[in-house]
Every structure is written in structure tokens, then in C-alpha cells.
Image (cartoon, rainbow, N blue to C red):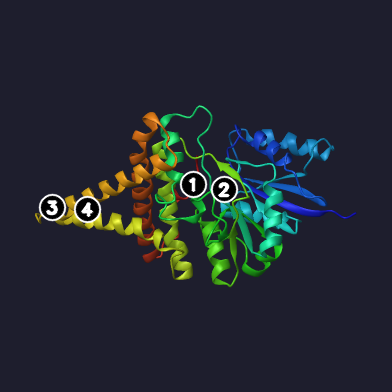
Amino acid sequence: MTLRVVSVIVPCRNERGHIASFVAGVQRQQLPAGWALQLLIADGMSDDGTRDVLLPLSAAVARGDGSAPIQLIDNPNRIVSSALNAALARASGEVIVRMDVHTDYADDYIAQCIATLAETGADNVGGPWRAEPGPGAAAMQRAIAAAFQSRWVAGGAASRSLRFSGWADTVYLGCWPRATFERFGHFDESLVRNQDDEHNLRIVRGGGRVWQSARIRSTYRPRATLTQTARQYLQYGYWKPFVMKKHGQAASVRHLLPGLFVALLIVLGLVAAIGAPAWPLVALVALYALAVAALTATVAAERPPGGAALLCVPLVIGAYHLGYGLGSLLGAFDVLRGARGRERLSSLTR
């Protein structure tokens, strides 16, 4: 009997503390009958000992001691899009599943992906983006996870709704029939962030379809500090104008609002600084403070983080919006002047 192959592609860099448990989780996946799994990990030249963990794991598989073939691939460009493309080039499966190291997966995650592809005929499927703090997490990470999960904090993104199943503009991670990449191409290696959103936009604009299924379950571990979160969203915002330039449109109106808000703050601040009345700036800040309070109330009602974490939620919401908005303005400025992207906003770190 010839087994059908599903290939799991994984971008990785400096994940020594997490990579062994991640691989073990992939090997626990309960595949449908008649399917075999291929695991391809594209490492961005890790220098923290990650490769020292991966090499024995791949060697064990070669000796027949492992349950899923592991291939370690070099990713000298050290960014996610090039990692995914390097893994795709070596993938032999008729179905491709992306997994990330900082996510935990239900044991039927891959099986549900394969089933959803068969049921919907979609060009990409995925589950909702569920965030949970790590065991023993401090108040800030609990606040970051709670705010992250709120669909309203994210501007109405369906990917944050754990119960939503239906057609979507993007999904978390993704699972594709191989034909999707033959039809729509691989990931854009000029993008350090947002390469998945851009690929989904390319699919939808090209007549393809993306489906989110609540049955595809995983848990993402968010950043632990406010500084890490602000930098993450600064990068998300920064690379979004590069996607807009490529396609001549935003994937969604929600991607434009933070940049417009920060631009208005800057303009009103400059106007006030040269002696004009300051009340428009004060009014805008007051309105945003009310909006943050309302969003904090929705977070507390939907998923109360409890205690000191709730007091951190307004700071997290501000970091999301202001980080993304400032990044969007910097990215738009660089797009307009024809720049390729700032090196300081091109490195991916936790």
C-alpha cells in the first residue's frame, strides 16, 4: 500500500528551549489511515544550541528510532519567508502544513487540516489564532494573551474568534494542497513579516478561497513583555505597506486605521507645538483613552485575566495600536522613497 504524504514545514531560529518538545508534539500527531508524515525544519543558522538538539533527532530518525522523518534545512537568510520556501523546495507531500515552534497543537491538528481541505475544496485552511500564557506566566504575559484574543482589539479579525468557521481573508499558519503553490506561487522573500497575509491575499485576489475551521485547534504562546510585544507589532505594521504596494490595496480596512490614528496624533501634536490650540489633540487622546477603556472592559468580560494582569491590559492595547501604527507610517515612508526595508526592522526575535 502506497502511503500519501503530508509535509510539515517549520521556520526555526534560536529555539533550543522549545524545539525538542515541539518535535515530540509533531510526532504525536494522529494521522488519518493511509497517511505518512514528513517533517522539514528550516533553521535560520541558530547560534544558541538549537542545532545541537536537532542533529541527534534527525540522526535518530535516520537510524529508524523516530516516528516521523525529520529533515534539517539551512536557512542562511534567517527570515520566515525564506525558511518556508526552503522547506517547500524539499517537501514531497501532496498536502503542506505549516507549523511554528511557539505553538502547541491538538493531537488531531493535521488530521483536521486534511479533512477540512477535503470537505471545503479550499486553497488554504487553518484554525483560529488562540493565545495562552505559558505555565506560571507573569501578569504582563497574561494580559498580552487576553488582549490578543479579543477580536475587537484586533479590529474585528475573524482569526481571533475561536468559534468561527467559514470563508476568511487569512488564517493562522495554514494548510495547503500542493497545487495551491503551483497556482499562486511561494512566499514573498522580500517580506520579513506578513508573508502569510500576503500569500492569502494573493490566493483570494487570484480567485482562490481560504477557510477557517474551529476544529483545527492550536495554542500560541505570545511574547512575555510589553517591549517585545511593541516591537513585534512595530514590525507587523512596518511590513504591511510593502504588501499594499505589491497588490495596490490593503487586505482589510483594519490594517489602515492604526497608521491613520498615529499620523493624526503626530499632526495635532506638531500643530499644538507651534502655538495652535491644543484642544483637538487633547480631545483625540481622551477619545482614544475612552476606546481603550471600553476595549479593556470587553477583554475583562470575554476572558478576564484577573488581578494585576487586568491593570496591564490598557498598556498592551496601546502597544498593539501605537506600535502597529508607527510601524505603518515608517513602512509607508520607506515604500514612497523606494527603500527595500530597514535592517533594524528585519530581524525576527522573541
Query: Seen in the image, is 328 located left or right of residue 129?
Result: left
Q: Hey, what amino acid is under mark 4?
A: Leu
- Quarter of the picture holding the N terminus: bottom right
Question: Looking at this view, is 29 or 226 the one in front?
Answer: 29
Q: Hey, what amino acid is under mark 3?
A: Ala
Question: What number is the disc on residue 347?
Answer: 1
Q: Label 4: few (<14), some or many (≥20) within 10 Å?
A: some
Question: Looking at this view, is 299 or 236 the one in front?
Answer: 299
Would you identify the image quadrant in which residue 188 lies? Answer: bottom right
- State yes or no: discs 1 and 2 in contact (Cβ < 8 Å): yes
| Tag 1 secondary structure | loop
Mark 1 → mark 4, Cα distance in angstroms: 33 Å
- State yes or no: discs 3 and 4 in contact (Cβ < 8 Å): no
- Residue 328 placed where, x, y %? 37, 57
- Residue 274 placed where, x, y %? 11, 55
User: Circle 2 sits on which residue?
Assistant: 78
